[in-house]
Image (cartoon, rainbow, N blue to C red):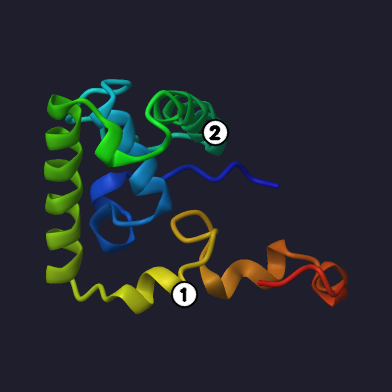
Amino acid sequence: MRQQNYSGYNDDMWGGFTEIGRIIRDAKVFGLIPQDEQCKDWPRHKFEQLWDQVVNEWDKYGSMPGNLPKELREKHANIHAVALEKAKAMGWTPEEWLTASDFDGWIKEEDLDSVVPPEWLQRSEHHR
């Protein structure tokens, strides 16, 4: 299968207000990547590595923004508020978050049938 690369934070669905976008925002909060990093053309494995680093940072604070030191808590609130407002301006609603696919930003919904084998979907524990 061809390697799927990320479109970049600003070109992601809802201006980056997606699961991958959250990884990027949290990585910026913790100083794991520069504030202007878009992660454009990053392969999936690079996000997995970044996610591991983000999780390690969150573990220090019980995965709760309220447990962050004041400076990080304010940085987190600001970064996520900007992202939320941008997404809302683009037409995002909470329902969009609930119905988003794990593949958003990687594989178009109409292309999933060519990627996910039909026999895989027939098993009761698997779903789209």
**Residue drawn 46% across and 28% down?**
59
Whole-percent x, y for residue 99 in the image = 46, 75
Whole-percent x, y for residue 101 in the image = 52, 66
What residue did someone put label 2 on?
48
Secondary structure beneath dot 1 equals helix
Front residue of 57/109: it is: 57
Q: Is residue 14 left or right of residue 109?
A: left
Disc 2 crowd rating (10 Å Cα; few below 14, some 14-19, many 20+) is few
Q: Is residue 98 left or right of residue 27?
A: right
**Residue drawn 50% across and 29% down?**
46
Q: What is the three-letter code of the residue carrying label 2?
A: Glu
Please tell me in which quadrant of the rendered image residue 68 appears. top left
Please tell me in which quadrant of the rendered image residue 79 appears. top left
Q: What is the three-letter code of the residue carrying label 1?
A: Thr
Circle 1/circle 2 CB separation < 8 Å: no
The answer to whether residue 64 shows anywhere in this view is yes
Front residue of 24/81: it is: 81
**Residue drawn 26% across and 21% down?**
31
Front residue of 94/40: it is: 94
Earlier along the polypeptide chain: callout 1 or callout 2?
2
Q: Is residue 11 left or right of residue 81?
A: right
- Distance, label 1 to label 2, CA atoms, is 22 Å
**Residue drawn 52% across and 26% down?**
49
Secondary structure beneath dot 2 equals helix
Front residue of 92/119: it is: 92
The image shows a total of numbered marks equal to 2
What residue did someone put label 1 on?
99
Quarter of the figure with the C terminus: bottom right
